[in-house]
């Protein structure tokens, strides 16, 4: 069997069979109901547009995918597996929406850890029901030892939103489930909210499918179609934004207005050696910086950029930035002066010029 590389899978997976006059792409299928006797029957149970996207993402991550209405709907579906008095281990600097949901669930304990500190995670995981990992974390940019942590006994979930399957495939390391906010890099154009899970276990797939059907957190066919269209160029966008992010991170690290840069591609970054082993040659499009002078100085930088858009979210073709602590739900362990930069695919010198004048 020929094993294709991710770039080829991104382009060719999830397509109709090449019969004469078949379209090259599955069209979006807006249908609330289907003629009885087939596999879908009703719009909440299944849709051919979902299947096309799921086949493509599943091929990229090396498992079976399910699309959800948003990243957080996917997170919520996975966390529904934890029993009411269960213990969850999670990064202290994880995505704020995930941390918020963990606070709301009736759990015995949520142990917030530094995922870069492998021994601490291993100890915290001993009697846990589920280990939640992000690598890199959003927005702490901590890099986890996935080969060690994915093999822990508890159910291990990796939110792979930042790295995408173009940089790393956690299921290959033994993770039970991968979660994505497809709204970010995979859809890639800041015009879709969508989520997904991918797993190598058929039973887990079937349980999460049943959960999606019964709870109703289903994606729209048009959103899923747009996400698959975005996924076709994921490799190109990740290459370009990673190359630009590395160059900007290098320049920011030398800038007097910047106290600290977190980017795993920088040799000086604490996650660099690990990321170099685990990621496939590039380090992603997200750079976090701490601005000298605190929150007010960081807000002033945001106010002075013009090409960089002040906006939350990340992973679009257009570069955006924001001060994360402007959100009350953001983890208090995230510094007040931290700006998260989502590097798009514009010209690197145009991006630098705008940043440099804002920092001046
Ligand atoms: C945005 C994000 C989510 C939530 O996804 P939505 O699509 O916004 O619901 C989950 N995890 C990470 C790492 C994210 O960046």
Image (tube, helix red, strand yellow):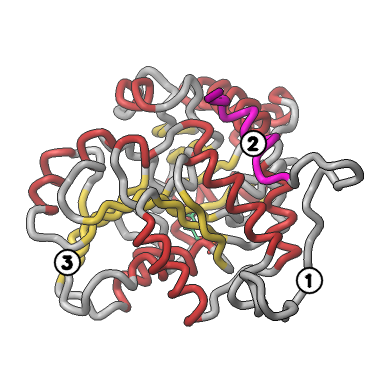
Relative to residue 58, is residue 120 drawn left or right? left
Indicate the position of residue 199 as horizontal and vertical percent values. Answer: 40, 51
Indicate the position of residue 99 as horizontal and vertical percent values. Answer: 34, 64
Mark 3 secondary-structure assignment: strand
Disc 2 residue: CB within 8 Å of ligand 1: no
Mark 1 secondary-structure assignment: loop
Which residue, as the protein is rendered here, is positioned at the far front? Answer: 37
For image coordinates 72% across by 44% down, the residue present is: 15
Q: Which residues are magenta?
A: 1-15
Is 25 one of the magenta-colored residues? Answer: no
Per the model, the C-alpha gap separating discs 2 and 3 is 37 Å
Q: 166 above or below 203?
A: above
- Check disc 1 and report the residue beneath it: 30
For image coordinates 64% across by 52% down, the residue present is: 53
- Check disc 2 and report the residue beneath it: 10
Q: Is residue 291 among the parts visible in the rendering?
A: no
Q: Nearer the viewer, residue 195 or 113?
A: 195
Relative to residue 211, is residue 79 drawn left or right? left
- Check disc 3 and report the residue beneath it: 87
């Amino acid at each position: 069997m020929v094993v294709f590389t991710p770039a080829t899978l991104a382009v060719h997976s999830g397509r109709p069979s090449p019969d004469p006059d078949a379209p090259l792409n599955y069209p979006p299928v807006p249908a609330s109901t289907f003629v009885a006797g087939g596999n879908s029957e009703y719009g909440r149970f299944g849709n051919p547009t979902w299947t096309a996207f799921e086949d493509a993402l599943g091929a990229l991550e090396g498992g079976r995918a399910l699309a959800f209405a948003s990243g957080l709907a996917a997170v919520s579906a996975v966390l529904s597996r934890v029993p009411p008095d269960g213990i969850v281990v999670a990064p202290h600097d994880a995505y704020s929406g995930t941390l918020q949901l963990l606070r709301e669930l009736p759990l015995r304990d949520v142990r917030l850890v530094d995922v870069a500190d492998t021994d601490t995670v291993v100890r915290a995981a001993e009697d846990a029901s589920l280990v939640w990992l992000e690598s890199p974390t959003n927005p702490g940019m901590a890099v986890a030892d996935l080969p060690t942590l994915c093999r822990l006994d508890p159910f291990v979930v990796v939110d792979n939103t930042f790295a995408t399957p173009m940089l790393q495939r956690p299921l290959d390391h033994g993770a039970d489930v991968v979660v994505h906010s497809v709204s970010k890099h995979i859809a890639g154009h800041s015009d879709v909210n969508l989520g997904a899970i991918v797993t190598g276990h058929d039973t887990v797939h079937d349980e999460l499918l049943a959960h999606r059907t019964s709870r109703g957190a289903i994606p729209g066919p048009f959103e899923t179609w747009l996400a698959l269209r975005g996924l076709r160029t994921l490799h190109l966008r990740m290459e370009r934004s990673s190359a630009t992010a590395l160059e900007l991170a290098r320049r920011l690290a030398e800038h007097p207005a910047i106290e600290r840069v977190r980017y795993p591609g920088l040799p000086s970054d604490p996650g660099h050696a690990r990321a170099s082993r685990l990621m496939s040659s590039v380090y992603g499009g997200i750079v976090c910086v701490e601005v000298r002078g605190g929150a007010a100085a960081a807000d002033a930088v945001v106010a002075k950029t013009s090409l960089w858009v002040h906006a939350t979210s990340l992973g679009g073709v257009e570069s955006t930035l924001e001060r994360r602590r402007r959100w009350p739900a953001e983890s208090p362990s995230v510094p007040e002066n931290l700006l998260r930069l989502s590097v798009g695919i514009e010209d690197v010198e145009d991006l630098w010029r705008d940043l440099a004048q804002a920092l001046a």
